Amino acid sequence: MPTNETDITAWLASQHDAMVAALREMVDTDGGSYDKAGVDAVGAQIARFLDGHGIPVQTLPQSRFGDCLRATVEAEGGAGAGNQRRNILLMGHRDTVFPKGEPTRRPFTIEGNRAYGPGVADMKAGLVMNMFVLAAFRRFGGAPGPLVGLFTGDEEIGSPEGRPVIEAEARGARVVFNSEPGRPDRGVVTGRKGGVFSVFDIEGKAAHSGGNFEQGISAIGELAAKITAIHALTDLSRGITLNVGLVTGGQSVNTVAPWAQGQIDLRYVEPADRDEVMAKIEAIIARSFVPGTKAKLTIKGEFLPLTQDDASKRVYELYRGAAQEAGFDAKPNFSGGCADSGFTAAMGAPTLCAVGPVGGKAHSPEEYLELDSLVPRAQALARAILRLDAAGI
C-alpha cells in the first residue's frame, strides 16, 4: 500500500471523535434553505476548520441564499499533464429542509450507534466527511490532481443560485463525488430522477356564495379540475410521477373563490420525458375547465436526472473496490430523489452520488446517521481519489 494511502487512512481512523464534534456543531446550527444567515453560519464553521488545516477557501457570494464556498488542495508539485490538470470535485450542500428553530427543538443527539438531528445525514455528515478528506490530503499529499471542495447553500430548493456555480465547476472536472448520504444498504447512487418544481396561479371572480352565486367564477373549482388532470399524467411504468403537494386559495367560506394556487412536483427518469410531460402540464394550465378562469404556470426550481455513462461506470467500479477495502460493499442504487449530481453529470463530468456517511429517513424527525460509517466512508473516498490514475480516470 502506498505511503500516502497508509497515512491518510490511518489519520482518518483517528478522527472519529473530531468528526462527531464537528457534526454536532453543524447540526445544532440553523440552516434551512431560506435562512441565508444560518446557512452562511454553517459555512463559517467549514471555513474555520479548513483554514485551520491550511486550506484556502474562496467565498462566492450569493444574493438570496447561502454563499458558495470553494476550497482547494493543490496536487503535489502543482498540476501535471493530462487529467492531472483537471479538478477532482468533492461536493455537498449546507442547507436543510427544516424550519427556523428546529435545532433548538431537536438538537443533535446520540443513541447507540445512531446520531439524530435536523440534517444530520442530509447532508451535514457528508460535509464533515469532505472536510476531513480534504484535510487528510493537505496533511499527507498524494492527490493525483487538484482537489476542490464545493459547499453550496440551496440544493433543497433546486439550487437556483448554486446551479451556475456547480455547472461552471463541473465543466473542467475530472470526476465528481457528491457526498449525499449513503444508502441504508451501505450503497451509493448511480442514477437519480430529474425533477421540475412549479407553481400555478388561478384567477377567478369573487361573488357571495348565497346571494349571487351565479356571478362568481370559482378558482378552487378550476384548481380541483387541474389537479385531477395533472395527476392523471403519472406513468409509473416509465418512472414519471406528478404530485400537487401544496394548495391554497379562496377568500372566505361564503365567497366563490377568486384565486387559488397549486404547487407541482414532477419526477422523471429519461431526459426526453421532461419536455413531453411539461408540454402536457402547460396545456392543462392553459385550458379553462371552469369558464372564465385564467391561470399561469411558473417554474420555481429544477433538477436534471443523474444518468450513468461509461466514464461514470468506471468511477463506480473504482469506488466499489475502495469501499470493499474499507469494509463495506457499495451496491448501486437508483433514487427517485433529486440532487446536484444531475447537474454535474449533464455537463459531462463522470459523477458518483451518495458517497457520504450512511443514513436514512431524511427530511423527517426520524432522520438518522450511522456513526460507524463516518470513518469507512471517508477512507473509501480517499482511496478512490488516490487510485484515479491507476483506473485510467
Image (tube, rainbow, N blue to C red):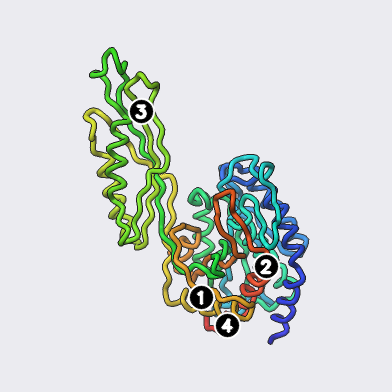
Report the residue marked by disc 1: 316
Q: Nearer the viewer, mark 4 or mark 2?
A: 2
Of the image marks 1 and 2, the number of the one nearer the N terminus: 1
Q: Please say if 85 is above or below 369.
A: below
Whole-angstrom CA distance, mark 1 to mark 4, is 15 Å
Q: Please say if 75 is above or below 210.
A: below
Element under disc 4: loop
Of the image marks 1 and 3, the number of the one nearer the N terminus: 3
Residue 291 in which image quadrant: top left
Q: Residue at x 46, y 76 (%)?
A: 313
Whole-angstrom CA distance, mark 1 to mark 3, is 49 Å
Does residue 149 appear left or right of residue 261 in this picture?
right
Q: Residue at x 26, y 49 (%)?
A: 280
Element under disc 3: strand
Of the image marks 4 and 2, the number of the one nearer the N terminus: 2
Whole-angstrom CA distance, mark 4 to mark 3, is 59 Å
Whole-angstrom CA distance, mark 1 to mark 2, is 22 Å
Observer-nearest residue: 24 or 177?
24
Amino acid type for the residue under numbered disc 2: Asp
Q: Please say if 156 is above or below 54.
A: above
Q: Residue furthest top?
A: 211
Q: Residues within 10 Å of mark 4 (few under 14, many from 20)?
A: some
Amino acid type for the residue under numbered disc 1: Tyr
Amino acid type for the residue under numbered disc 4: Asp
Element under disc 1: helix
Whole-angstrom CA distance, mark 4 to mark 2, is 29 Å
Report the residue marked by disc 3: 259
Element under disc 2: helix
Amino acid type for the residue under numbered disc 3: Trp
Report the residue marked by disc 4: 389
Report the residue marked by disc 2: 372
